[in-house]
Amino acid sequence: MVGLIKNISFFKERKSLDVTEIREIAACFRFEEINEGSDVMEYGDKAENFYLLLSGIVSVQITNPGIADWKVQRRDFLNL
């Protein structure tokens, strides 16, 4: 797993990471296979995961709600 992480550009760019830190990151990873056409997450889900795509294709679709409605629904988050 350490070799895989070291070859991902996101982590390559962080040249200050040593092997111990990369091992700590690797310990947090888990493989998850997602079936074609399945949703990984839905709009409004709590961000609890960080996904790295090893193979395949992913698309992101975000609904564009009316801005007024969006603000009302997220009033507590926006501190309005």
Image (cartoon, helix red, strand yellow):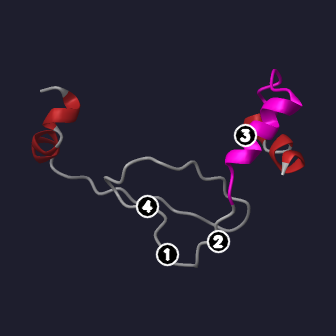
Local SS, label 3 = helix
Q: Tell whether 10 sits left or right of 38.
A: right
Residue 27: in magenta span: yes
The quadrant of the picture occupied by the C terminus is top left
Near-viewer residue (65 or 12): 12
- The numbered mark at residue 69 is none
Q: Tell whether 31 sits left or right of 76.
A: right
The reply to whether dot 4 and dot 3 touch (C-beta < 8 Å) is no
Q: Given the image, on which type of amino acid does mark 3 rest? A: Ile
- The numbered mark at residue 38 is 1
Q: Which residue has dot 3 on it?
A: 25
Going from N to C along the chain, the mark reached first, 3 or 2, is: 3
Q: Could you give the CA–CA distance between mark 3 and mark 1, rounded to whole angstroms?
A: 27 Å
Local SS, label 2 = loop
Occupied quadrant, residue 43: bottom left
Instruction: Indicate whether 59 appears above or below 13.
Output: below
Q: Which residue has dot 4 on it?
A: 41
Local SS, label 4 = loop
Nearest to the eye among marks 4 and 3: give it.
Answer: 3
Q: Which residue has dot 2 on it?
A: 33
Q: Could you give the CA–CA distance between mark 1 and mark 4, rounded to whole angstroms?
A: 9 Å
Magenta-colored span: 12-30
Q: Given the image, on which type of amino acid does mark 4 rest? A: Met
| Disc 1 crowd, CA 10 A, few/some/many (<14, 14-19, 20+) | few
Q: Tell whether 54 sits left or right of 62.
A: right
Going from N to C along the chain, the mark reached first, 2 or 4, is: 2
